[in-house]
Amino acid sequence: MSTGDLRAPGPGPRPRQRQDEDLDGLVRHVARGDESAFEAVYDQLSRPVYGLIRKVLRDPAQSEEVTQEVLLEVWRTASRFDPAKGSAMAWVMTIAHRRAIDRVRSVNAQALRERKAGSVLAGSAEEVAEAVETRLDAERVRRCLDSLTELQRESIGLAYYGGYTYQQVAGVLDAALGTIKTRIRDGLIRLRDCMGVSW
Amino acid sequence: MRFFREELHTLSGVYVLDALDGAERDRFTRHLHRCQPCANEVRGLRETATRLAMAVAMSPPAHLRERVLAAAASTRQLPPDTEQLRARRFLRSRRFPSSITAREGRFPRLAAGLAAAAAAVAIVLGVTQAVTQRELGHARAQAQAVEAVLSAPDARLLTRATSDGGRATVVVSQSRHALVLTTSGLPSLPAAKVYEVWFLAPGRTQRAGLLPSPTAGRTAPLVAHGLAAGDRIGVTVEPAGGTSRPTTTPILVMSLPT
């Protein structure tokens, strides 16, 4: 796989930026209780983890809480990371997204989400494009997003960044369930191929 | 059934985006254990979603760093899952495909398929990896028997759907009078029942072995000896311990290349 594309994100020079292979190695050190490796992991992961959670939850205080939970989960369960199943970055971001989603779907967050729903809906496509512009690999990601149909892009944005179930996505986009399922899958496959992800 | 499975397969995208809830999510998670192509697809799509996540990276408040590091220092870590580690180590120790790729020049078309089959078998062995030393020894002997069939110059790979929604993969060698059978997605049976494998020929039915009980939806490779040219292979559900002749309608009958 092209590990170079999975670098810790961030505009401008980042002296602590390491390649993803290093992250895999760091996580193995963390599994042995190495606290300084965990510091390095924090420095690599805090921005993508917080950014994703903030994107989904919107609320800064909740996002901070969940970010802390996720990073502690990485510390606690580092020994269970299995490189055969994917990169360390994908492992962590999967945990982060699930935790954010759990929070979104919990009863307490319901009201908050309702309030934010309008803005997610209005902005999803533009937000994606806007956000990727701050990225080192902005050009490629944006070109790839551009290659999707509008329905694909919106569905993926609502599900991933909005934390919607696919039934909810189908509801707000007024489309059939089967259509949303296949559009999301087709869209992700197209993104995967466009981005040259080789897993 | 066919429609049902294709339907399930299309859930990979919404699964990766966590847009799948409750029973449907559980069903797809179970499906992943027995559908290797789906698991591969999920892995690739997950890496893709990761790039979308990184596209929205944002610095958290500076004070979070100290808080997280302090919390980590006072949080006990989980020990490794020893079973998982042993399975990984065992997989690394196996080299199924080497003897096959060495022969690539002689039957290039087969080599790729066989390497895939060997990898699949290695995975099955890894997944069903034994917990005790004795079982480990047994698994190794089993692996050698498997390898003997896989490395035969006339080895052929075939795969068929079973009538109950599973899939059988067979590597057969007429010159070795043997085959290796693995399955995925067969419905699990009550303790009093077992899947029995048969060599079938006009006027002759011969027991070929019992499938081990599945782990994560897959059965470890069964090596069946005593295959004769023209035999077909069949699988039926029988009382535990097996019977001397089939008593139920086969879930699989498959012709073999001669």
Image (cartoon, coloured by chain):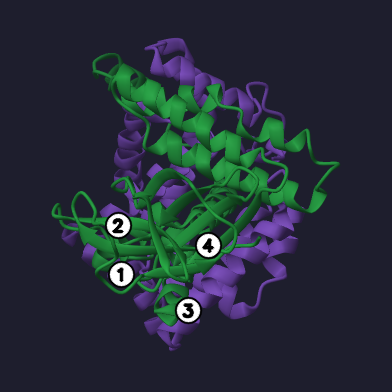
Disc 4 from disc 1: Cα separation: 68 Å
Query: Where is mark 3, residue-wise?
Result: A180
Residue at horizontal 47%, vertical 75%?
B6
Numbered label attached to residue B222: none
Identify the secondary structure beneath mark 2: strand
Q: Is residue B5 above or below residue A6?
A: below
Disc 3 from disc 4: Cα separation: 47 Å
Disc 2 from disc 1: Cα separation: 55 Å
Labels 3 and 4 within one chain: no
Query: Where is mark 2, residue-wise?
Result: B195
Q: Amino acid at mark 2?
A: Tyr
Horizontal relation, residue B29 to residue A184: left or right:
left
Of marks 2 and 1, the one in the foreground: 2
Query: Where is mark 4, residue-wise?
Result: B231
Query: Where is mark 1, residue-wise?
Result: A115
User: Which chain corresponds to the colour green?
Assistant: B
Q: Colour of chain A?
A: purple
